[in-house]
């Protein structure tokens, strides 16, 4: 499977002009494909599975910035803690504490995004609005000095109806704006990770600062993942 280089360059130019960061989602794709985009200048790559990320990182250039965008289990944090650039899907305080613990062991501060549940589907992970407020209001007391909350991440409903998608992104942006005003300790609320291949244009219109694109760049994935 070849990488869609022209699409990459188009999207990259579009995003650069708008100051939006592109995370190239390479899950299930071989290291050769990642290297193709790397040679075009891409440095931010996203993966969903811990073992796959660890294996790929070992084979690829060290200046790649690896984003973990999947659902992270606490017992696997230690495997990515030494090198991960940003963990997008933090959806519990328990996970945040574990990341902090591993950050401390590795003598680094690990950047995180809190995942907010904005979609209709029950299956998607993330805090609801109340849980998020609670977590944020407690965050200062916890002294988690080896993590930094850099913003929020969310996924819209899986639907053809772009009005729903837009509403959900708008809601997330509103929550993000409220969060930004809180000025937390260890917090740098500047990243809003929303938008994928099918909805990134809408996400940018609604205020996204970071999009995660897989299939448009690397082609469709064979498995449903
Ligand atoms: C797979 C995945 C993406 C990329 O999806 P595409 O539709 O292939 O662009 C983005 N974000 C998350 C969390 C994903 O799991």
Image (spheres, helix red, strand yellow):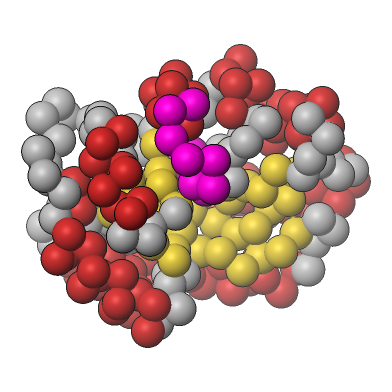
Which residue is outermost to the bottom? 17
Side of 132 relative to 57 (left or right): right
**Where in the figure is residue 199, as x and y percent of width and height?**
23, 63
Q: Residue at x 86, y 44 (%)?
A: 145
User: Is residue 223 positioned above or below 88 on the image?
Assistant: above
Image point 78% across, 68% down: which residue?
183
Quadrant containing the C terminus is: top left
> Which residues fall within the magenta stretch?
58-71
**Quadrant of residue 180 in the image?**
bottom right
Query: What is the quadrant of residue 42 in the picture?
Result: bottom left
Residue at the image position 78 percent from the left and 30 percent from the top: 106
The location of residue 5, given as percent across then percent down, is 17, 59
Q: Quadrant of the N terminus?
A: top left
Q: Is residue 123 left or right of residue 182?
A: left
Q: Quadrant of residue 109?
A: top right
Front residue (pair 58, 131)? 58
Task: Please provide percent x and percent y for residue 30.
Answer: 25, 31
Residue 211 versus residue 113 in the image, above or below:
below
Q: Give the camera-side residue of 160 and 108.
A: 108
Q: Is residue 147 visible?
A: yes
Q: Is residue 121 visible?
A: no
The residue at 35%/75% (across/down) is 15
Report the number of discs.
0
Residue 164 covered by magenta stretch: no
């Amino acid at each position: 499977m070849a990488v869609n280089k022209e699409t990459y360059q188009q999207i990259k130019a579009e995003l650069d002009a708008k100051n939006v960061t592109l995370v190239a989602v390479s899950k299930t794709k071989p290291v050769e494909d990642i290297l193709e985009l790397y040679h075009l200048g891409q440095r931010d790559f996203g993966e969903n599975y811990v073992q796959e990320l660890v294996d790929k990182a070992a084979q690829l250039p060290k200046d790649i910035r690896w984003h973990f965008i999947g659902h992270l289990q606490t017992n696997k944090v230690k495997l990515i803690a030494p090198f991960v650039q940003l963990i997008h899907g933090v959806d519990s305080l328990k996970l945040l504490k574990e990341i902090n613990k591993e950050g401390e062991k590795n003598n680094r501060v690990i950047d995180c995004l809190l995942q907010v549940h904005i979609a209709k589907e029950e299956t998607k992970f993330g805090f609801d609005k109340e849980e998020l407020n609670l977590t944020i209001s407690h965050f200062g007391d916890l002294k988690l000095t080896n993590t930094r909350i850099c913003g929020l991440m969310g996924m819209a409903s899986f639907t053809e109806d772009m009005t729903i998608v837009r509403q959900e992104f708008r809601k997330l942006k509103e929550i993000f704006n409220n969060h930004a005003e809180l000025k937390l300790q260890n917090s740098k609320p500047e990243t809003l990770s929303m938008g994928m291949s099918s909805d990134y244009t809408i996400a940018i219109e609604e205020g996204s600062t970071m999009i995660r694109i897989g299939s448009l760049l690397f082609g469709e994935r064979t498995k449903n993942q």
